[in-house]
Image (cartoon, rainbow, N blue to C red):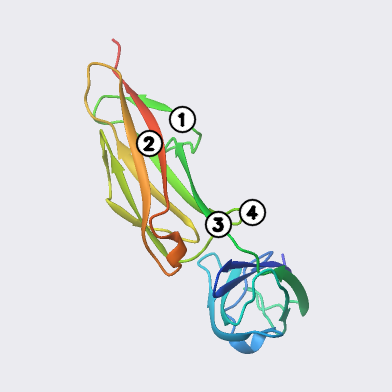
Amino acid sequence: VKAELKDAYKSNETQVQVNFTNKIAVPTKDNFSIEGLTISGVKITDDQKSVILTVAGMELDKTYTVAVKNIVDANGKAVADGKVDFVARKITYKADMDIVDVKTGKSITEIKSDGKETAKFVVTLKDDAGNVIKDNAEIRFTTTAGNFAETKVAAQSGVASNVFTSEISTAPKDALITATVVASDNKDLINLDTKRTLRMSPVID
């Protein structure tokens, strides 16, 4: 499926994210222009479907137009030249955390307190419009019970996951998990956190 220009939005005070419908080849600054702004950096995201433009001169609440030309998709096919508008609005951020079964990926709220059963915690960084923020970020996981495979995890395209293992307990026990952004290229993400509770229940013979 050939890639096409999808949309664009301001991801922070100095960056604009341009999205495509499919994977594209690594672009250069010459492939993009925004009237009224200077583009100083171009970086493709890990999934190859988005490009982060580092810009200077954005004015709050002003509408800008991103022009794209001479882009090639991952299969070597030309992507149609195009333009897309975005508003340089003031944005806030949030972190969503889901708990899923390691094998099936289905949402769960409880595991066995046998010291062996696991759950995966998945953190997604978003802005207030629901866009996934793909800035580089490192997330620290802490828990009041049980343990994680890693203390800190790097977010890939706005998503970080960590595997949790239960502890042995003869009575039901809740683990309070906190995920906190401790480092990021986007300074507005630092110290952003989210919390979830996972119930650990004893095995009944």
Residue at the limit of the structure toward the front, as seen here: 60
Q: CA distance from mark 2 to mark 4?
A: 29 Å
Which label's residue is closer to the chain start, 3 or 2?
A: 3
Q: Name the disc covering residue 92, or none.
A: 3
Residue highlighted by disc 1: 108
Residue at the limit of the structure toward the bottom, as seen here: 30
Query: Which three-letter amino acid code belongs to the residue tagged 4?
Result: Ala
Tell me the mark number nearer the camera, choosing from 3 and 1.
3
Query: Which three-letter amino acid code belongs to the residue tagged 2?
Result: Ala
Front position in the image: 6 or 95: 95
Tell me the mark number nearer the camera, choosing from 4 and 1.
4
Which label's residue is closer to the chain start, 3 or 1?
A: 3
Q: Residues within 10 Å of mark 4 (few under 14, many from 20)?
A: few
Q: CA distance from mark 3 to mark 2?
A: 29 Å
Q: Is residue 122 left or right of residue 80?
A: left
**Helix, strand or loop status at disc 2:** strand
Residue highlighted by disc 4: 129
Front position in the image: 51 or 105: 51
Which label's residue is closer to the chain start, 2 or 4?
A: 2
Task: Please tell me how many numbered marks the rendered image carries.
Answer: 4
Q: Quadrant of residue 109?
A: top left
Residue highlighted by disc 2: 119
Q: Residue at x 38, y 36 (%)?
A: 119
Q: Position of residue 22 (x, y in %)?
A: 66, 65
Q: Check whether the beta carbons of the residues at disc 1 and disc 2 lie within 8 A of each other.
A: yes
Q: Residue at x 23, y 29 (%)?
A: 167
Query: Which three-letter amino acid code belongs to the residue tagged 3?
Result: Thr
Q: Residue at x 72, y 64 (%)?
A: 1
Q: CA distance from mark 4 to mark 1?
A: 26 Å
